[in-house]
Image (cartoon, rainbow, N blue to C red):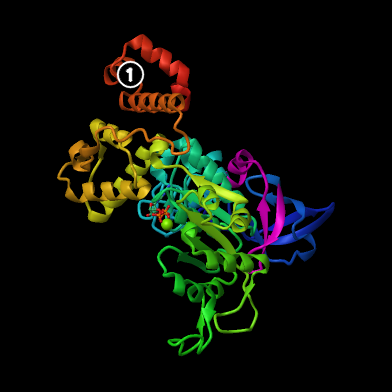
Amino acid sequence: MRLSARISYDKKIFIDCEKNIIPAQAVNLSLLGIKIKDSFDHCIDVDVLVMLELDQDISLRGRVVRNEKNEHVILFCEDPKVIASTVGKYLTQKIYESKKCPFCSKSIEKDEKYCKRCGMFFDYTKPEVVRFVQDFKVGKVFYDLLIEHPEEIDEVINKDTEFIGVSKEMRTVFSLIRKYATNDYPVLIIGETGTGKELTARAIHERSHRADKPFVAVNCAAIPENLLEAELFGYEKGAFTDAHKRKIGKIEFANGGTLFLDEIGDMPPNMQAKILRFLEDLSFSRVGGNEIIYADVRIIAATNVDLDKAVEEGRFREDLYYRLNVLTIKLPPLRERNEDILILAKYFLNKYSKEVGKEIKGFSKEAEEALLSYQWSGNVRELINVIRKAVVLTENKVIKEKDLDLKRNGFGEIYWVKTDSLNLKENIERLEKDLLKKAFIVANGNITKMAKLLGISRPKVYSLIEKHKIGEVN
Ligand SMILES: Nc1ncnc2c1ncn2[C@@H]1O[C@H](COP(=O)(O)OP(=O)(O)OP(=O)(O)O)[C@@H](O)[C@H]1O
Ligand SMILES: [Mg+2]
């Protein structure tokens, strides 16, 4: 899905390429850049200045690249503010003049900010929208998010599946996704179940130059040890009793694209050795064959087990671990990023209520508090299931606490002992901080309410807040 509207722009432009001024015929214009008809091979990957006529003559810094169809495009490298006030303003004006949505062609009224059919946003005069487009290149600017959380718009990555998060932790994840997408090194994604490991792997793939090639996922824990090798590398006819004909393995399928090795921590030792060998030079042979096959794949691995410990205990090869553990992404559990809980909950509430045709306005205050204080051991996947069930079962216009059916956990198991430390003082400090954080959220920062929940005096609450810097954390 495209994010930025592309409008036809049939005009002559001038390109200043290393002090040579070259005329070119433009084809279309978007927030990201301008497509040109002419061939500019001698300027590929060179920083240029593009002179074009919008409401007035302007020049913008850009870079000539070839797109996936081998056409020449000049990508703008300007500050979002500059793009918003020039190209953004022009695009917005043209969209309204055309009176139809540039994405789905539905006719639009004069003051409509977004398309009532496809939800796309029309106003490109805002720098945050430009930044969003520049960062992600794909996706959809959600009107709701833009209006309700304008500061968070660039924290949403969206392609076929939406990837949502506004917490500091998730912002770091998004920025790593963008960085890692620009190269071919292996990536290791670490996180509890349901935190979005596969989503992260796909997001990297979709933003990489491999995006139009396959993304192939293999769950190393779900395939029996004796079949995993054939699954990954394929086999030749006659390699074993049931091998009636040659079969291509997942690695060959992924050629040019990305191979996602899920639950790599559960990969049997002999397979670990074979994958390591494959990683050395990206070549392998099918089971029962001698032919050396080369496959250009990027490996992204994920695990929910502590690989450090697995290495220590001899369950995971140290050399493979070091090979994979260069570019890593740690996905924080949902309970450690409270800011994301409500935004995810609202997003999925919206999505599922539309799906089942119910008009549900939001959550009651108590329901929000319950969502925030719940333990979420199944992370985002569990949250999705809870919301979906609540949407289907509720007869209310607003989701109430009882619709969520989270009661059994009270405030959740807020604290779990870090298995790598039994130090009493350290663990008590953590417990104190976690309880305080939960109380802060549940009480919405109200000190009297916090004191009551925690069973301590108000001055004590103040001193603990200061000690643990709770206001700053939240
Ligand atoms: N930040 C997020 N925004 C939107 N959806 C999310 C987010 N994180 C996870 N999800 C959704 O939650 C579900 C679980 O995510 P995913 O399968 O990527 O997790 P996982 O870490 O691979 O889980 P597991 O370890 O159980 O395989 C998916 O439906 C995914 O789309
Ligand atoms: Mg997974």
Q: Residues within 10 Å of mark 1 (few under 14, many from 20)?
A: few
Q: Quadrant of residue 42?
A: bottom right
Q: Is residue 296 shown in magenta?
A: no
Q: Quadrant of the C terminus?
A: top left
Query: Relative to the observer, which residue lies in front, 270 or 263?
Result: 270
Q: Helix, strand or loop at disc 1?
A: loop
Query: Relative to the observer, which residue lies in front, 194 or 76?
Result: 194
Query: Relative to the observer, which residue lies in front, 445 or 25?
Result: 445
Q: Is 108 placed left or right of 136 in the picture?
A: left
Q: Quadrant of residue 430?
A: top left
Tell me which residue sits at (42%, 36%) in the image: 336
Image: 240 above or below 32: below
Q: Residue furthest right?
A: 19
Read off the magenta span: 61-88
Query: Relative to the observer, which residue lies in front, 220 or 202?
Result: 220
Q: In which quarter of the image is residue 270?
A: bottom right
Image: 364 above or below 282: above
Q: Which residue in the protein does label 1 denote?
A: 446
Q: Is 228 placed left or right of 44 in the picture?
A: left
Residue 125 coordinates in the image, percent (x, y): 54, 41
Residue 428 coordinates in the image, percent (x, y): 41, 25
Residue 306 coordinates in the image, percent (x, y): 49, 48
Q: What residue type is labelled 1?
A: Asn
Q: Residue furthest front?
A: 313
- Residue 231, visible in the rendered structure: yes
Tell me which residue sits at (52%, 41%) in the image: 171
Residue 249 coordinates in the image, percent (x, y): 51, 76
